[in-house]
Image: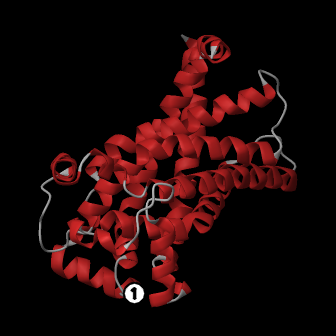
Amino acid sequence: MSDFIQWTYENKLQISIDLAAGSVSGIANCISSHPLDTVKVRMQMSNDGVLSTLKKIVQNEGTKGFYKGMSFPILSIPITNAIVFSVYEFWKSFFIGNSNKQLTYFQTAFCGSIAGSSAAFFSCPIELTKCKLQMQATEKIYKNPIDCIQQIYQKEGFKSLFRGMCATQQREILGYSAQFAVYELIKDFLCTLSQKSEPSTANLLISGGLAGVSCWTIGYPQDTIKTILQCQKPTDQAIYKVRFYDGGFLDCLRKKIISEGIGSIWKGYSVCILRSFYANAIGFYAYELAKENFTSFYQLY
């Protein structure tokens, strides 16, 4: 603990830069990805395809329907991303200290998994609120994110705000470990291919995009189960056996596959992959750019 406090004190400038850059990345990612995220959630909870889901949202709710539930994430995702990137940088320094050494890809994946696990405690209630609001097509149960949290807390208790935590942890640990490892792998490969020591803008965008695809591919089945567990109504919660060690994850996964087939846990994947490529390309580029500019600013002053 004393080592962590000492490291925090000695690297407070770097931590503040990571937090600021992570916040910029989170805002850029959220704004660019939320409309397709709404389509993904609707598809996970129905048997509709991409076009029919898009058509229903436009016809019944208008274009603003794509942005349902966005206010809470856009305020909180910067904090989530700040946690991810700062925890990642902390564990990165744990392995290499202040040297210019490069992490191995296994070490990078490990740092990513710890960062993802840390963020899950914060992102799970946010995801719960977001999904609840995104599923409000015609009937309006919740007025806003705060009202949603209050109603869940009053009717179901505090622990219900963390419904789907096991699935969220699995998604974040696997997803972020793949994301950071693939990002560094592709970035190094493209630098070697172009024979340049520093990555170009195109390099960062491609690396970020493919990192996002890998993140969501490895974590998508977990995300589908998370959505089902979080979006089910209180009257439907007895459908899945909620055990203390998995929160209903295994029972929900088993019943979903038995009743609808293995393909059911991949509903909305095509939309998600499209979203993940461009949103993470923008997110990683925004992080690298913001980090560079914040570092230059602090050095100047």
Location of residue 140 with respect to 5 vertically, above or below: below
Side of 222 relative to 95 (left or right)? left
Side of 216 relative to 235 (left or right)? right
Residue 69 in percent (x, y) is at 26, 57
Residue 95 in percent (x, y) is at 78, 30
Frontmost residue, 17 versus 111: 111
Side of 251 relative to 31 (left or right)? right
- Residue 175: quarter of image: bottom right
* Residue name at image x 72 percent, y 44 percent: 110
Location of residue 250 with respect to 185 vertically, above or below: below
Frontmost residue, 42 versus 288: 42
Location of residue 135 with respect to 157 vertically, above or below: below
Q: Which quadrant of the figure contains the C terminus?
A: top right
- Residue 36: quarter of image: bottom left
Q: Is residue 288 visible?
A: yes
Q: Which residue is mark 1?
A: 49
Q: Amino acid at mark 1?
A: Gly
Residue 50 in percent (x, y) is at 40, 83
Residue 193 in percent (x, y) is at 86, 56
Q: Label 1 crowding class (10 Å Cα cut-off): few <14, some 14-19, many 20+?
A: some
* Residue name at image x 54 percent, y 68 percent: 220
Q: Is residue 67 visible?
A: no
Q: Which quadrant of the figure contains the N terminus?
A: top right
| Colouring scheme, one of rainbow, by chain, secondary structure, one colour | secondary structure
Side of 152 relative to 126 (left or right)? left
Q: In what element is the residue under mark 1?
A: loop
Number of callouts: 1
Location of residue 201 with respect to 263 vertically, above or below: above
* Residue name at image x 32 percent, y 48 percent: 159
